Image (cartoon, rainbow, N blue to C red):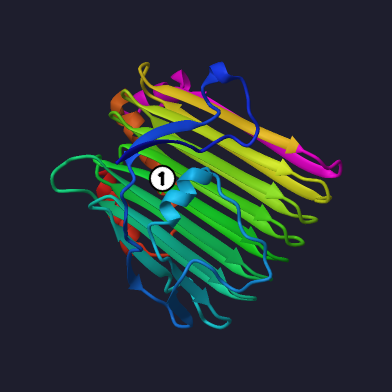
Amino acid sequence: MEKTIEVNPIPCLTWTWLKINKDSVTYDFSLAENNGTDQQIPDGVSVTSGKNIQTQLDEPENSIGKEAVELITSATTGKIYTFEKGEAGDDTKPLIIRINVDSNCATHNIIHAKTGTNCNVIIVYAGGPSTGSGIVHGCITKVYAEENAQVHISKVQLCDTSVNQIDDTQIVCGDNAKVTFTQIELGGSHINASFHATLSGYQSKFESDTAYICCKNQYIDMNQTVVHTGKKTQCNMKTDGTVKDNTTKTYRGTIDMRKGCCGSKGNEMETTLLLSPQAVVKAAPIILCGEEDISAEHGSTIGKLSPEMLFYMNTRGIDQTTAEELLTRAKITATISKLPDENIKQLILDFIQ
């Protein structure tokens, strides 16, 4: 049964005529559970079922909206990955989860990084139905980073163009914890990709690096929010991608400095390379400030290949089409260099090719 819901609501409403406050989707939300296949599990990581854990941290918030969360959560029993202190998730052996999206399905995973752990997690979305008909995949990933935990979570989306996806990453950080989030969006049809990070712990940190290519008739809608509540917290959000053909890309990026987060710093930058006059690009970088002793910066840049850059390429025998391909590829390769697995890096390069 089809249902229309609103997703990715902006934390602070702006003018309605801008059509950037939210996205609306209509799907058949008869979802089957699909929590993925564990392709690699490091030592010291336990895997259990469930959607709740025992922790002193606050519950992370979502960015996709209450209705979407309820539809996805109700369709799955959930899966919990607990990183114990020790050698769990070292850089040479990350936890790798592969989710093959071949029908309407829902995913609910929890990454629980206990005190002092160093965790690496890679989630790969791939596949699509053999019939070519449109399907929907809803995904919720919760990350609990306890005191002094270091977490690097990466999401790689390489789905077929028959796949529509609603993907939300919810993060909460304890004292001196740091979460690094790498997101690569390349496939799919209508993609709603969002994250919400809460920096509640003293001197906790969050960094994100999102790269994407939006081409043909794709629709990418992003909603990124970082809330500072702890003292001397830091965030750095970077989104970089290419838009061409008859596509639509919407970016919402919010840094919310709440009362009590004195000494905190935040930065967000979104850059879009626009390669088609038919493409639609919308962006809303926002800073909300409820505390005086803070430092925050934001920006959004949309531009074409500059005449100076094109001239530089032409003088070296590179035409405009090839130059655009090189720059598009460079944006992705710069981000995938941060992934701690060579096989997945090659998988992404093969997909681009």
Q: Which residues are magenta?
A: 289-317
Above or below — where is 56 with respect to 336? below
Q: Residues within 10 Å of mark 1 (few under 14, many from 20)?
A: many
Q: Nearer the viewer, residue 267 or 56?
A: 56
Judged from the image, the secondary structure of the residue bearing numbered disc 1 is strand
Q: Quadrant of the C terminus?
A: top left
Q: Amino acid at mark 1?
A: Ile
Above or below — where is 298 with respect to 303? below
Give the residue at mark 1: 166
Image x and y of residue 101, in percent: 27, 53
Above or below — where is 93 with respect to 68? below
Above or below — where is 193 with respect to 286? below
Residue 315 visible somewhere in the drawing: no
Image x and y of residue 285, in percent: 61, 32
**Is 12 on the left or on the right of 76, as rendered?**
right
Query: In the rendered image, which quarter is residue 86 located in?
Result: bottom right
Q: Residue furthest left?
A: 131
Tell me the residue at 37%/24% (across/down).
275
| Total numbered labels placed on residues in the image | 1
**Is 228 on the left or on the right of 324, as rendered?**
right
Tell me the residue at 55%/70% (across/down).
112
Tell me the residue at 28%/29% (across/down).
216
Q: Nearer the viewer, residue 19 or 351?
A: 19
Query: In the rendered image, which quarter is residue 190 located in?
Result: top left
Check if residue 231 falls in the magenta segment: no
Image x and y of residue 106, in percent: 36, 55
Image x and y of residue 148, in percent: 67, 71
**Is 11 on the left or on the right of 323, as rendered?**
right
Q: Quadrant of the N terminus?
A: top left
